[in-house]
Image: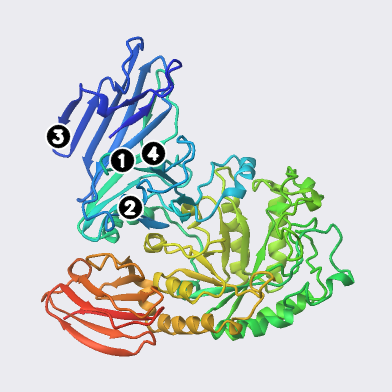
């Protein structure tokens, strides 16, 4: 249950662990068990190590009546540092429902570790110490906290002294998996265990690590604390709550759900239209980026290739959005220089005359609102170049060109490094904060109150971007109570839940259902070019769609939805279904496929939503061919019935009622219709 790194100078691999110890002392009271090791044992015996390292683990009853609270204290009374603590360290976990059905689930992925962590029979052999899937290694690790691929932000985050941001991790076959929340589950729809540390915000965030033993095919699941305990020092863990559950992860997450609810404190409520929204549309209005010191108003910038849209096009874009169930339009490169020297220019003016005037922009935004579509301006005021950088003391990184254009080779950051790089401002810089607020005030005074923030990096320093956001929202909400604030979330989704309505991240569809179950805000986005499959997956899982169809060879969002008939049809179909069953998506508890007794077979995706008196289950065929599957639902775990009987209404993908059935017991077995590829069948259960 506890394992320590003890890197003595003459043998750095040395470890101390409970499993190497034989002098344990156990005491028990009504509500707890205390396990004490006066001297932890070594994995390799040495006689010349003075002193000892002791460990105390306490297991006690949680007030929820169903969880166990676990804590650990390490006392280093030796002459050497303890370099790492693994706690809790669960070794020897079994695939109790078979290798395929026993899943490790968190917000961001659901994987079958007993399958994917096996050493492949055929593989390219790398150096064993760096090959995660070398025979005998078979490790995978996760760092929670973010909804992003962080690779290009790591170095710049040192500016604000914030921790290394988490990222997306790879498993065999190049599949991406991530862990957004510090919550995890191991089990199946027949039961399992959920585990999370009671930490929040900037508290020390452990790594989660999985290892499959190739000798025993047993799993090790642990939390790794990268800390140093000096001689004479002590370390106390956070509380870990372990919750066993009878059904799927959606039952095990309830303790973490309550913990999160106690810590989310929104000053400004998310607008109802965002809660109800299926998604939004993004348009990059220009190919022009930040690669010229000159104000881009010369004739060379006045042709069709440089400007995808003008302000006059916005009402037509809004009509297309409204016709496809999208009530938010996000504009990139809309006029204010992009990471340019005058990024916070006042008095406010656009520098792209071909797009139109600021007054025309405000007028068209107003027209869009009458159509039913809100317009949000994507701004980039955190990253900057000279001479603006000098004004705020920003350190420029010469290798950060951040330049892109369809005619460049490569299209992003060519090796000739135009403009000499840029940097990120410290968000506690008072002069910058005042300029940002004046900038936002000028936008709001013009009728432009909804903002999407590029590169939203939080910091434990105060003031920080979170306090600035409150000041921004005070301005924008005063002008428009339904104004939105979105952002490219970077490194602390827990704290950002207090401030963001939705995210604008470079993410495709991921399985984020546990996040959607727990967090009412922000709505996490998935970017979709023209894929009907991703539209259907996002719809079924209540993921915020960011629709941006692209003309081949041009910038993102440069095409119309109408030019992509498969995309258009999928959006209209899902929009109608969402309106028909809206209460489930806005007020229901997302229970995923936990209503089933077995996970759906490959090629099918199932998500369910529970209201107090009914459940909606959506079955999506992603197999690529016409097919049907058996269904076995255990309704008793999710919907109470005094009689033990239920009824189900079955709808097709157009929302038409096609069958009604009575159910005489809680276990219900049936089959779907033979569904075409990407077709949806909908089941609504009620007690009777």
Say which residue label 2 marks.
Answer: 115
Question: What distance separates the C-alpha of mark 3 from that of mark 2?
Answer: 40 Å
Q: Tag 1, which secondary structure?
A: loop
| N-term-proximal mark, 1 vs 2 | 2
| N-term-proximal mark, 3 vs 1 | 3
Q: Residue 422 location, x and y as percent? A: 74, 49
Question: What distance separates the C-alpha of mark 3 from that of mark 4?
Answer: 40 Å
Say which residue label 4 marks.
Answer: 137
Question: What distance separates the C-alpha of mark 3 from that of mark 1?
Answer: 35 Å
Q: Is residue 229 left or right of residue 667?
A: right
Q: Is residue 215 visible?
A: yes
The answer to the question of whether label 2 and label 4 lie on touching residues, with beta carbons closer than 8 A, is: no
Q: Residue 280 location, x and y as percent? A: 55, 74
Compare residues 294 and 368 and report the one nearer the observer.
294
Depth check, mark 3 against mark 2: the one in front is 2
| N-term-proximal mark, 3 vs 4 | 3
- The structure residue drawn at horizontal position 24% and vertical position 23%, both measured from the top left corner, is 21
Q: Residue 318 location, x and y as percent? A: 62, 82
> Picture quarter containing residue 308?
bottom right
The answer to the question of whether label 3 and label 1 lie on touching residues, with beta carbons closer than 8 A, is: no
Q: Is residue 392 left or right of residue 687?
A: right
Q: Tag 4, which secondary structure?
A: loop
| N-term-proximal mark, 3 vs 2 | 3
Q: How many marks?
A: 4
Say which residue label 3 marks.
Answer: 29
Question: What distance separates the C-alpha of mark 1 from that of mark 2?
Answer: 12 Å
Say which residue label 1 marks.
Answer: 213
Question: What distance separates the C-alpha of mark 2 from that of mark 4?
Answer: 14 Å
- Label 4 neighbourhood size at 10 Å, few (<14), some (14-19), many (20+)? some
């Amino acid at each position: 249950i506890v394992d320590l790194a003890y890197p003595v100078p003459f043998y750095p691999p040395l470890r101390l662990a409970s499993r190497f110890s034989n002098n344990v002392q156990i005491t028990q009271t009504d509500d707890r068990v205390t396990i004490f090791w006066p001297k932890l044992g070594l994995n390799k015996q040495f006689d010349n190590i003075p002193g000892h390292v002791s460990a105390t683990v306490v297991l006690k009853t949680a007030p929820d009546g169903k969880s166990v609270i676990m804590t650990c204290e390490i006392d280093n009374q030796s002459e050497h540092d303890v370099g790492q603590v693994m706690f809790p360290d669960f070794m020897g976990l079994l695939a109790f429902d078979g290798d395929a059905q026993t899943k490790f689930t968190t917000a961001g992925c659901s994987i079958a570790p007993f399958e994917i962590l096996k050493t492949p029979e055929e593989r390219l052999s790398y150096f064993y110490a760096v090959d995660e899937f070398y025979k005998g290694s078979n490790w995978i690790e996760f760092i929670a906290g973010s909804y992003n691929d962080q690779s290009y932000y790591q170095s710049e985050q040192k500016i604000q002294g914030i921790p290394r941001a988490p990222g997306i991790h790879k498993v065999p076959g190049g599949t991406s998996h991530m862990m957004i929340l510090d919550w995890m589950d191991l089990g199946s729809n027949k039961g399992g265990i959920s585990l999370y540390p009671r930490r929040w915000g900037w508290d020390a965030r452990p790594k989660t690590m999985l290892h499959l033993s190739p000798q025993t095919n047993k799993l090790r699941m642990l939390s790794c604390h990268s800390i140093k305990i000096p001689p004479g020092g002590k370390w106390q863990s956070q509380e870990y709550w372990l919750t066993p559950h009878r059904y799927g992860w959606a039952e095990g997450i309830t303790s973490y759900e309550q913990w999160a609810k106690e810590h989310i404190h929104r000053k400004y409520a998310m607008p109802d239209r965002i809660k109800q929204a299926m998604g939004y549309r993004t348009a990059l209005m220009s190919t022009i980026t930040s690669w010229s010191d000159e104000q881009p108003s010369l004739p060379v910038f006045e042709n069709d290739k440089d400007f995808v849209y003008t302000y006059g096009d916005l009402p037509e874009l809004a009509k297309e959005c409204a016709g496809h169930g999208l009530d938010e339009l996000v504009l990139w490169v809309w006029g204010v220089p992009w990471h340019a020297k005058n990024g916070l220019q006042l008095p406010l003016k656009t520098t792209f005359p071909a797009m139109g005037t600021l007054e025309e922009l405000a007028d068209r935004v107003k027209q869009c609102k009458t159509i039913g579509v809100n317009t949000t301006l994507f701004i980039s005021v955190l990253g900057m170049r000279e001479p603006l950088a000098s004004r705020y003391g920003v350190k420029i990184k010469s290798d950060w060109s951040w330049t892109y254009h369809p005619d460049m080779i490569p299209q992003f950051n060519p090796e000739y490094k135009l403009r000499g790089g840029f940097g990120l401002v410290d968000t506690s810089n008072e002069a910058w904060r005042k300029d940002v607020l004046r900038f936002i005030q000028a936008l709001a005074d013009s009728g432009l109150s909804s903002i999407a923030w590029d590169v939203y990096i939080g910091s434990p320093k105060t003031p920080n971007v979170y306090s600035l956001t409150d000041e921004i929202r005070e301005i924008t909400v005063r002008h428009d109570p339904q104004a939105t604030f979105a952002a490219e979330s970077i490194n602390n989704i827990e704290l950002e839940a207090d401030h963001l309505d939705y995210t604008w991240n470079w993410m495709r569809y991921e399985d984020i259902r546990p996040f959607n179950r727990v967090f009412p805000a922000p709505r996490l986005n998935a970017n979709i070019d023209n894929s009907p499959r991703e539209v259907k997956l996002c719809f079924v899982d209540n993921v915020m769609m960011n629709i941006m169809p692209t003309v081949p060879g041009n910038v993102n969002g440069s095409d119309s939805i109408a030019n992509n008939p498969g995309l258009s049809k999928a959006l209209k179909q899902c929009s109608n279904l969402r309106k028909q069953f809206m209460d489930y998506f806005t007020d229901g508890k997302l229970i995923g496929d936990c209503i089933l007794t077995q996970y759906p077979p490959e090629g099918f995706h199932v998500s369910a939503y529970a209201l107090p008196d009914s459940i909606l289950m959506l079955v999506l065929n992603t197999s690529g061919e016409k097919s049907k599957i058996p269904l076995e639902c255990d309704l008793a775990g999710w919907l109470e019935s005094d009689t033990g009987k239920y009824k189900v209404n079955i709808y097709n993908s157009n929302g038409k009622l096609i069958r009604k059935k009575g159910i005489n017991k809680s276990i219900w077995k049936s089959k779907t219709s033979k569904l075409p590829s990407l077709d949806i069948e909908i089941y609504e259960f009620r007690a009777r």
